[in-house]
Image (spheres, grey):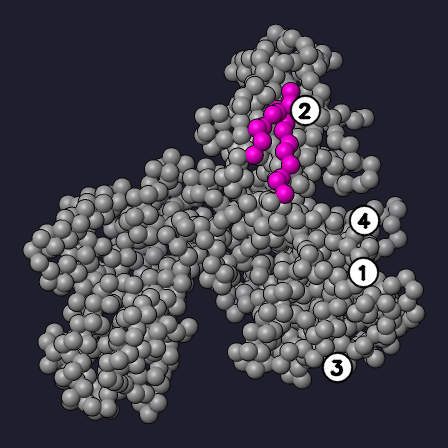
Amino acid sequence: MTRGAYVGAFESFLESGALSGWVCPLHNSESDQQPLRVRLQLEDLLNPGMAWSIAVLRASQPRPDLQDLGIASPCGFLFPGKASTSLPPLSTGLVLRALVDVEPAVELPGSPLRLDPSTYQRLERLCRSHQSSQPRLDPVQGPFLSGWAPPAAEHELRLDGQVLDPVSPGADGQFRLPIPPAGCDGRHHHIALHNADGELVCERIEFTPFQLTPWSALQEHSPAPFPDQLSPLAREHHRSLTTWLQWADADGIPLPPNLPLLQRLLSSPIDPPHNSAPGQEAGPDGAPTPRLPIQLNLSAEPLVSVVVPVHNKYAVTRRCLAALAYAPTRIPYELIVVDDGSSDGTASALAEEAPGVQVIRHDYSRGFNQACHSGVAASRGDFIVLLNNDTEPCCRWLEELLEPFQRWSDTGMTGSQLIYPDGRLQEAGGIVWGNGEPWNYGRGRNPHHPGVGYTRQVDYVSGAALAIRRQLWNQLGGFSPEFSPAYYEDTDLAFKVRQAGLCVRYAALSRVIHHEGLSCGTDADPSTSEGLKRFQTLHGPQFQRKWADAFEGERQPSFEAAELIKDRGILGRALFLDHGTPRPDRDAGSHAALVEMELVQALGYKVSFLPTNLAWLGSYTEALQRQGIEVLHAPFTLSLEQFMQERGGEFDFIYITRYTTVRDSLHLLHLYAPQARLIFCNADLHYLRELRQARAANHEPEATKALLEAVQETRRQELEAIRAVDLTLSYSEIEQAVIEAECLGQAATARCPWVVEVVGEPTTLHDRNGIAFLGNYQHPPNRDGVTAFLEQVWPGLRQRLPDLELHLYGSGLSAEQHQAWQQTPGLRVHGWVTDAAVVYERHRVFIAPLRAGAGIKGKVIAALAHGIPQVLSPVAAEATGLRHGGEVFIARQSSEWEQAIANLIHDDQLWTRCSQAALEHARSHYSRQRGLELMADALAQLHLPMRSLTP
């Protein structure tokens, strides 16, 4: 998309018939404020010199679709029709060119467009009549709502459903209306454009401003203390502060001793007041005050060595130290600052104002490359983290930067998400194109966009904030000396890591603010710059020669291609659909969903997950992103239909959980993703569960009849979904056989894996007491099973074992039910627990007295994996292969329940034998390797590509 000093594209014909494209300067400057002009002209390649001007267009149309790609200014051009000249006759050499109207003219990527009879007719029709485009809404611009609508058509604009003034487009279709004062509140609003019939034609979710003074102007012209809540970084500062407070409240971790000082330093301008004396900075009221020491929580036994190279600009370094102290982390680290020949007293200032920080001094400036080597040579941590001094690490940045090393053993190097001080994204991992040109992916985009919010393999990460094992750094020789003093050393190191068979990963949740240019300048032109930045241009060709054999993929950089190749190390793409985001501490099905996505990833797929409720759920969503899963959510995705229209064509298969999700999405999947194979994870047969529930309820005949009619309808819909997809997965061999019988063998089925992590040794008997149950009580079989147990088994069991206690855990319990059960003698109602392992580790026996249900029971498998003996109903034991008297005890009558529980309470040898048998069963049937094999078998049925399995 780059041509000379410009970036853009000629996009040919829109669906409306108009010709479109966009162009803007590659590097904006003061002289680039006027929009560029684009000349459309016809040429005959068989008759050189023959040219016909079609139109000269201003590249000033808003292009909100480019904003996520880092293009914020209006730079689109549109030719809706009415050419200034008639077309020449069609010939085999006739082409249409789009040229930036400068001297010499620059042709846009996508140009020329060769005219065949079909495209010639389209252009001819376009030149004879004005073709209207679809109405659109642009991003909020200051206090205005703007967009485009056909000039002759009536439309109305609505803000949160309230009708505003009528839309009156100009002759070019552009319109602009002021936001009503009541809507200027800094909150998100729904903006919709409706036609004269009241039909919705386009909509957006936008935050409206409540004041327009830029943050930089507030810092310059308003008095201290500054309104930090208006800072573009307020969200990150607030996240750090609330995390410190939460840790102090929950775990007694002390707050940073100089928290007010840190807050002031991060809210104030970097440079001290103009009337400051040496050793002073802005105080609480903005007046000069002596600098105070910054206390950092440094460790004598560091896991991480943070190395910060600096050269002059001590105020920048001091702000970085303040950010390090302000950013909560539980990772033990040491801090090494390498003073690379500074002449502004950096070393002495650090000695006085940064106690505990190790300072290494170079007598002269050797550059970033060698400064990093000096710092690493003095380090003690297992991990090296290189950090620019013009950065501000954010909350839990080290935890997130190291997390990929813990999750994936092949991780060799990681890098943070870099954010500009104005809140825009600077970098989300790097791409190196087939021609050797590096790209900072995501520059200028929203850092919260789902497309940049998940961990993934990349070509390289920036040296501004990267982590690598010290052993690997030494093995590879660190930064290559040929890239001294700076630039391309980080890209080269990433290629050395990949050459060693390891992966480079972008850790999206490790956020670091980067004041780009404060350390090395911004001018990369070696003919005009004397700063380090000029080496960015000088070292590029050297890098391309060194690694020419390693470059792969597209040679011509483009935003479209970048969206596909940004995910390195994959064989295909899978979309997972479910009603909501998995919450593994709330229900077993969520655990299964996470495992299934991880298995598909391990087989070589990038996984995108779309909850049909479109909800972002905080730490639950972040857990998926941390796992390397792209999570689609509002407001970036507003409907399944919108998403499928935009991206349906990229997926190899779509994995759908629950028959209701299949029912509601099937037509959209067939329409927008006809190439994708459809896999339906049935979890359990809902109609079978409902049938058992109806029978267990023992209602009156009329009520039973109504329930059975509902079961019939569920059965119809469920079997319809099974027949409509390419493959149905079931956890249960029994239900797999039922499906095959119901569909007369016409529906393809496969086993769905269930994977658990088995403990090495269970908690000792001496630390256990009582019996326990765990479940989500909004799930009717759980609520019914506990109720029946309390009525039919518990009274007799308490007579037999008067001191025995039953502990109930789980979410979804109503206040009324909680109070009623809590009054039962010997019953302890604990409710939801963050870690289900405590249930299996605290108690002597686990029970699952389910009378209804279907599929495999996750709580039963989890109990097996923790080695706690169980007493189960036949329904709870179904499809597990568990043996009565072996791994578990299976009880039908009240007397059988009482006897089995009493035996396990009194007989330690029986308990131990049952525990060991349970662990062995879990290892042999529910291991990750077995799960990979089952998932691979399922994908193989659909002839989908996958990685080979390694034990």
Residue wearing tag 2: 98
Which residues lie in the magenta part?
164-181
Among the two numbered marks 4 and 2 on one chain, the one whose residue lies closer to the N terminus? 2
Among the two numbered marks 1 and 3 on one chain, the one whose residue lies closer to the N terminus? 1
Helix, strand or loop under label 3 = loop
Residue 712 higher or lower than 891, as above or below: above
Residue 309 in the figure: left or right of residue 951: right
The amino acid marked with disc number 1 is Pro
Helix, strand or loop under label 1 = loop
Using the image, tell me which numbered label, if any, was put on residue 356. Answer: 3
Calculate the distance from the C-alpha at mark 2 to the C-alpha at mark 3. Answer: 61 Å
Among the two numbered marks 4 and 1 on one chain, the one whose residue lies closer to the N terminus? 1
Residue wearing tag 1: 223
Calculate the distance from the C-alpha at mark 1 to the C-alpha at mark 3. Answer: 34 Å
Residue 668 higher or lower than 682, as above or below: above
Helix, strand or loop under label 2 = strand
